[in-house]
Amino acid sequence: MKLFGGTMQTLEHSLNYATQKNNTISNNIANIDTPGYKAKEVIFKEILAEQTTTSIKGLRTQPRHLPIGNNSLTPYQVVTNKGTTYNHNGNNVDIDKEMNELAKNQLYYQSMVERLNGKFRSMETVIKGGR
């Protein structure tokens, strides 16, 4: 029996994704003047689509059976953008794009934290007996 269903785990994965994205964007901004540095980005939808279409679902009829399929779903990955060059030194970090992505990611992270806080407030209400 799962105490919280899948909601807490989904929120945890969402926060991990947002943290990884923030770290990647921060690293890109920090290396804006590094010659030859290629910007990295965190991709999500492509990896999720690939993992959901290629995963095999298996039915466990006994607890001793091994699970089939990818139970450790991590639908994001950091990739390097090697196809472009914006600066004369071979660097391809676009500060405007990075700042835009950082702002969007901060909003996403904050919304996930608010949702997590809402779940905890609901549990607190139940524990206190609706008071």
Image (cartoon, rainbow, N blue to C red):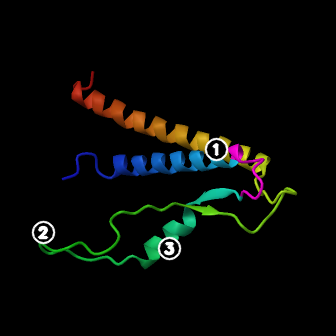
Query: Foreground mark, 1 or 3?
Result: 1
Q: Counting other residues with Cα less than 10 Å from the Cα at mark 1, is it few (<14), some (14-19), or many (20 or more)?
A: some
Q: Which amino acid does the dot numbered 1 rest on? A: Ser
* Residue lying furthest right: 88
Q: Which amino acid does the dot numbered 2 rest on? A: Pro
Q: Main secondary structure of the magenta part?
A: loop
> For the residue labelled by badge 3, is the local secondary structure a helix, a strand or a loop?
helix
Which image quarter is the C terminus in?
top left
Picture coordinates of residue 30, whole percent (x, y):
69, 43
Seen from the viewer's position, the closer of residues 49 and 123 is 49
What is the CA distance from the residue labelled 1 to the residue labelled 3? 27 Å
Q: What residue is rendered at 29% in x and 28% in y?
A: 124
> For the residue labelled by badge 1, is the local secondary structure a helix, a strand or a loop?
helix
* Residue lying furthest top: 131
What is the CA distance from the residue labelled 2 to the residue labelled 3? 28 Å
**40 with respect to 94 (left or right):** left
Circle 3 sits on which residue? Answer: 50
- Considering only order in the chain, which callout, 3 or 2, is on the residue closer to the N terminus? 3
Q: What residue is rendered at 46% in x and 77% in y?
A: 53
- Considering only order in the chain, which callout, 1 or 2, is on the residue closer to the N terminus? 1
Circle 1 sits on which residue? Answer: 26
Picture coordinates of residue 100, whole percent (x, y):
72, 45
The mark found on residue 53 in the picture is none
Which portion, as a residue range, is magenta?
29-37
Circle 2 sits on which residue? Answer: 63
Q: Is residue 45 magenta?
A: no
